[in-house]
Amino acid sequence: MHLRLCACILLSLTAVSQAEGKEEATIMSPEGFEQRIQEAGGRADFVFGDDRPFRQCHASTVVQAANGNLIAAWFAGTEEKNPDVGIWGSTCANGAWAAPERLAKINESAHWNPVLFRDETDAIHLFFKVGPQIRYWQTWWMSSGDNGATWSKPTELVPGDKGGRGPVRNQPIILESGAWLAPASTEIGTWEPYADRSEDWGKTWNRTPDFPIDRKLLKGKGAIQPTFWESAPGKVHALLRTTAGHIWRTDSEDDGRTWSTLYKTSLPNNNSGIDVQKLDDGRLLLVYNPVEGNWAARTPLDLALSSDNGVTWRTIAHLEDDADKEQEYSYPCIAQTTNGVVISYTWRRQRVRVWQIPLSVLDQ
């Protein structure tokens, strides 16, 4: 009797353990995740609808201003690369997004990849690229001291630059040392990632050498569009987009001045944008398309979490999961807010979608 009772108890405990493991491994659907977010006081919505003053939009960026408002920006026009493409933006105040307005149009060549960044003085900076082709990009920037209500006149970040200095797509981070570190890359022939450092609040920039790449291991064009985090003072890390089917990584021990040779992670990559945000407790959040293959599908779009400095990742939820693999949900931006994180991304090249996720949801 005792052996049979012990066996029953063991079977019951095993079943519970398996059920709990299965629940932990379950990835929440977009609908289920949105419902949980709404119950916690968050929301997921579109910045604008079908009534918009442009045909296509892409490469959004988002930041929370000091007054609590959200500011989003993206490039938009007839389609990517067209001369009519400019930088557009909107502000979310009191739960409502304002009508899109054009923030910048330097000349009649295509504009690209806006990057919003809030500095330690609460000023908001907007970086963006200008040029008919990626290899000829120039980086321009403008700033706002009143939470995005007005902006300074755009100026070149590094006068005379060709190829694009400063942040290429993802937001800079402020290091413990006080330096600004911008994730950068060029696409002049091969793809070459690097970091741009500023120690005077963006007035001047120092370009690091290109990150070392073993071309025998990382086949294809290379790596671009890093996303940074600092795990301890001076210890900085980057995940990068590649054409090789996976996200690759590099690390710095000296405040982002020099970097290790890129190495492969287990995270799949479809040669599309990724972004990482470090939370105050050290956890990392990653938004990406978990699809392996060069120019592979840009769906699903997932939110993943790491509690071991990016060594392992657990997918929390699909933000998008479309059965039609021709649809696009891509180029995410994730930023910290006063009560959690905000995520923006391209929705079918037609809209910008934004998720406001309370920290309590991430703690569940």
Image (cartoon, rainbow, N blue to C red):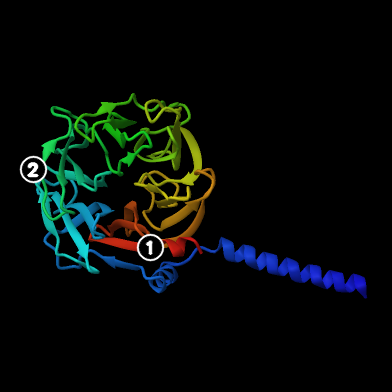
On residue 357, the disc is 1
Name the secondary structure under disc 2. Answer: loop
Answer with the quarter of the image where residue 69 lies. Answer: bottom left
Residues packed near mark 2 inside 10 Å, few (<14), some (14 to 19) or many (20 plus): few
User: Residue 364 location in percent, x, y?
Assistant: 51, 64
Residues packed near mark 1 inside 10 Å, few (<14), some (14 to 19) or many (20 plus): many
- Residue lying at 82% horizontally and 73% vertically, measured from the top left: 8
The answer to whether residue 345 is seen in the rendering is: yes
Answer with the quarter of the image where residue 233 lies. Answer: top left
Answer with the quarter of the image where residue 131 lies. Answer: top left
Nearest to the observer: residue 207 or residue 52: 207
Question: How many numbered marks does the figure carry?
Answer: 2
What is the three-letter code of the residue carrying label 1? Ile
User: Residue 6 location in percent, x, y?
Assistant: 86, 70
Nearest to the observer: residue 223 or residue 336: 336
Q: Quadrant of the N terminus?
A: bottom right
On residue 56, the disc is none
Which is nearer the N-term, disc 1 or disc 2? 2
On residue 153, the disc is 2
User: Residue 270 location in percent, x, y?
Assistant: 40, 47
Q: CA distance from mark 1 to mark 2?
A: 33 Å
| Residue, far front | 121
Left or right: 94 as drawn, with respect to 1: left
User: Residue 140 location in percent, x, y?
Assistant: 15, 38
What is the three-letter code of the residue carrying label 2? Lys
| Residue, far bottom | 1
